[in-house]
Image (cartoon, rainbow, N blue to C red):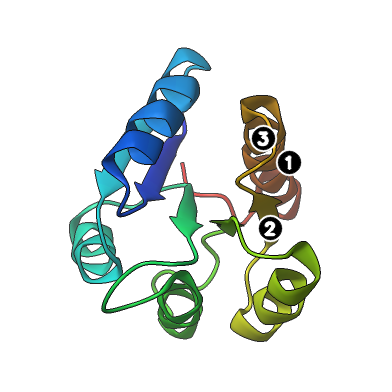
């Protein structure tokens, strides 16, 4: 069975492009346009990895990540934050929020695919990946 990615981004254009890239690579992709919807989705679906934009209204990616990591049911789910902000600033926030990885939005699609595959491999090596 294909690994499931929950993609959280308020930009319809960005979300469409990333969903297409991930789907073509063989992933099952669920989408949410904000953090609250993502958390509701996680209540009924168990994604193998969450890819979340940092800048979103109402609940930013950092807060979404903190909530995912604070919930015992989802704490082991890898979170990749994506953002167009400065990489140094985001790296510091990423660590504070508990994200597993950061990918700049300026990076090509292959960089995101590599990041998704890497966190899934880490999870399968430690036995914490969902199946």
Please tell me how crowded label 3 is: few (under 14), some (14-19), or many (20+) other residues with Cα within 10 Å: some
For image coordinates 53% across by 17% down, the residue present is 25
Q: Residue 103 at x, y = what percent?
A: 67, 50
Q: Is residue 78 above or below residue 93?
A: above
Task: Assess whether mark 3 and mark 1 are in contact (beta carbons under 8 angstroms).
Answer: yes
Left/right placement of residue 111 relative to residue 72 reads right
State how far apart marks 2 and 1 are (Cα). Answer: 12 Å
Q: Which residue is mark 3?
A: 117
Q: Nearer the viewer, residue 94 or 5?
A: 94
Please tell me how crowded label 1 is: few (under 14), some (14-19), or many (20+) other residues with Cα within 10 Å: few
Q: Which residue is mark 2?
A: 102
- Label ID, residue 31: none
For image coordinates 69% across by 58% down, the residue present is 101
Task: Pick whichever of labels 2 and 3 is earlier in the sequence.
Answer: 2
Q: Quadrant of residue 82?
A: bottom right
Split into 4 quadrants, where in the image is the N terminus? top left
Please tell me how crowded label 2 is: few (under 14), some (14-19), or many (20+) other residues with Cα within 10 Å: many
Q: Which residue is mark 1?
A: 118
For image coordinates 63% across by 64% down, the residue present is 85
């Amino acid at each position: 069975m294909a690994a499931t990615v929950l993609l959280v981004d308020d930009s319809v254009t960005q979300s469409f492009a990333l969903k297409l890239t991930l789907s073509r690579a063989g992933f099952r992709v669920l989408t949410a346009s904000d953090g609250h919807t993502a958390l509701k989705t996680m209540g009924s679906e168990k994604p193998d990895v969450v890819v979340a934009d940092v800048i979103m209204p109402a609940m930013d990616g950092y807060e979404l990540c903190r909530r995912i990591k604070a919930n015992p049911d989802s704490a082991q789910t890898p979170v990749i934050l994506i953002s167009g902000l400065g990489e140094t600033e985001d790296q510091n926030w990423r660590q504070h929020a508990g994200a597993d990885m950061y990918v700049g939005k300026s990076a090509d699609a292959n960089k995101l695919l590599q990041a998704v595959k890497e966190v899934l491999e880490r999870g399968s090596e430690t036995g914490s990946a969902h199946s």
